[in-house]
Amino acid sequence: MFDQVSIIGCGLIGSSVLRRLKKNKLVKKLVCYDNNKSVCEIIKKESLSDHIASNPIDAVKNSDFILIAIPLSSFENIISSIKDNLKPGSILTDTSSVKIGVDNIVKKLKIKNVTWIPGHPVAGTENSGPNAGFPELFQDRWTILSPDKNVKDSEIKKTSLFWESMGSKVKIMSVEDHDKIISLTSHLPHAIAYNIVKTVMASDEKAKADIVRYSAGGLRDFTRIAASDPIMWKDIFINNSSLIIDAIDRFSQSLNEFKKAIEEKNSEKLLKIFEKSKEFRKSIIKAGQDTDKPDFGRK
Amino acid sequence: MFDQVSIIGCGLIGSSVLRRLKKNKLVKKLVCYDNNKSVCEIIKKESLSDHIASNPIDAVKNSDFILIAIPLSSFENIISSIKDNLKPGSILTDTSSVKIGVDNIVKKLKIKNVTWIPGHPVAGTENSGPNAGFPELFQDRWTILSPDKNVKDSEIKKTSLFWESMGSKVKIMSVEDHDKIISLTSHLPHAIAYNIVKTVMASDEKAKADIVRYSAGGLRDFTRIAASDPIMWKDIFINNSSLIIDAIDRFSQSLNEFKKAIEEKNSEKLLKIFEKSKEFRKSIIKAGQDTDKPDFGRK
């Protein structure tokens, strides 16, 4: 595939990429960098990388493919520090959940002889850090690539093949479409999950114990994504704020209509909503994006 | 335990009780009734009951313990039809998710020589009907019993033992406290789940395909409970409307504050919310109410 690949940031996503690359022996030389020493120790202990660089410049200078998998708030700093040391002809890509912002940062720097391809593997768990990574994280999930129109097909093809070697399927989409779709499929659900937890936690202490006890009635489903990495999510909400606010407004409008249907005891309207929801769940299962086992197959 | 037990309604809950009772040979005679013929055929085919009665009166007349597991909207009809044919000294109980309404219905009928103990096993999956039932549905979940203060301890004890034999843990709580707690742990999450699905489904057809494709970013978690039985949930929202509306209002207020924090790019406030949510998830796992496996252990 590539002679040398660099992974910058070795959390859940970066370490899962490392694990897959190592497991399937996909590249000649694997280099990584993380600004957190304890993260580097885990990578070293598990022999997930051929070389652990002590700074971002050393990590990228001879690489053909550089994958940035760090929180959005660190993105500009890292890119600025490596921009003059990238190998001519290399591909620079990332895994961020919001694309317009990072795309602007890279374009503003006008990096020469390097192909920039914004990317986002739509995969993850509620856990974070290198111990949470595993080689099958991207299996059967989608990775969205958002290259500019003038990017060569050959470079898009190489980047697609990289993600396909991770087990992922690849879709090309503009950064604008990406940020809008993901604001609905990921950012809005996270906003809602955080707020439902916040709402129930505002109860008194006695009620709180009861809420934990009876959470299997539905609430516990929401607490999973509400346990995701706080820094990563703070960055996402700030970076994609206007589209997320738009999604929240649409949701609030829907919720108000629903509330009215309950107040009016409008059985017909409620039934229609619930039956459509059931159909939507079916389409997600049919598309291979969730298990058909009841309760997610929980045990 | 009891010589004869009757199960009225053999959907997910009723059939799971039947399965557990049969599997562990817990009662001498098991009688059931369901107004849906195809449901009865499944019960018959799987030999889940010693007798399938052709009407509710025949189903209950000689039983020591009668469990009503039907949609709320059918409750009054069924209770009215059986009230004069219950065995003196028997226990009448149910599994409804809203308690004040059914409690009022039964009390209004002033049934003599029968002990009424409202009950609610906080368990279930997104699937419905007898084919979805299984004997371990109640294992390690909580069942809430809400008997009146004048109900004899011996009868509460018998009903508790019944649910413990299902693998459940039992908690005693007033009907008022029940409806309030469950409005937060179950009814509000369902209202939210239906509305997030409704919001994203309002997109155009092209976007809808994308939404399904990238649902693993968070959305798919919500679609599970949004696929629950429409009739059951229509009844719940109508029966517990005022407490659910109150919960929705509290949620909306929280969401508005959150929206403001995003608009103001208030990192500190967002981080605080996310870190608290993470703690709450931990407390649910610690209480044995969810798996600690990432992604619910999905495969």
Image (spheres, coloured by chain):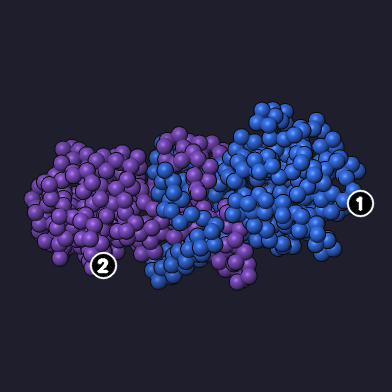
Chain colours: A purple, B blue
**A267 or B271: nearer the eye?**
B271
* Amino acid identity at mark 1: Lys
Mark yes or no: residue B92 visible: yes
* Amino acid identity at mark 2: Ser
The residue pinned by badge 1 equals B112
Q: Secondary structure at mark 1?
A: loop
**A88 or A229: nearer the eye?**
A229
For residue B77, side relative to residue B242 (left or right): right
The disc label shown at residue A142, or none: none
Q: Position of residue A152 (x, y in %)?
A: 16, 40
**Crowdedness near tag 1: few (<14), some (14–19) or many (≥20) residues, C-alpha within 10 Å:** few
Image quadrant where residue A268 sits? top right
Q: Position of residue A188 (x, y in %)?
A: 45, 53
Where B26 sits versus A228, above or below?
Answer: above
Q: Residue at x 8, y 50 (%)?
A: A88
The disc label shown at residue A38, or none: 2
Where B1 sits versus B48, above or below?
Answer: below
**B120 or B238: nearer the eye?**
B120
Q: Position of residue A134 (x, y in %)?
A: 31, 51
Q: Residue at x 45, y 56 (%)?
A: B292
| Chain letter for mark 2 | A
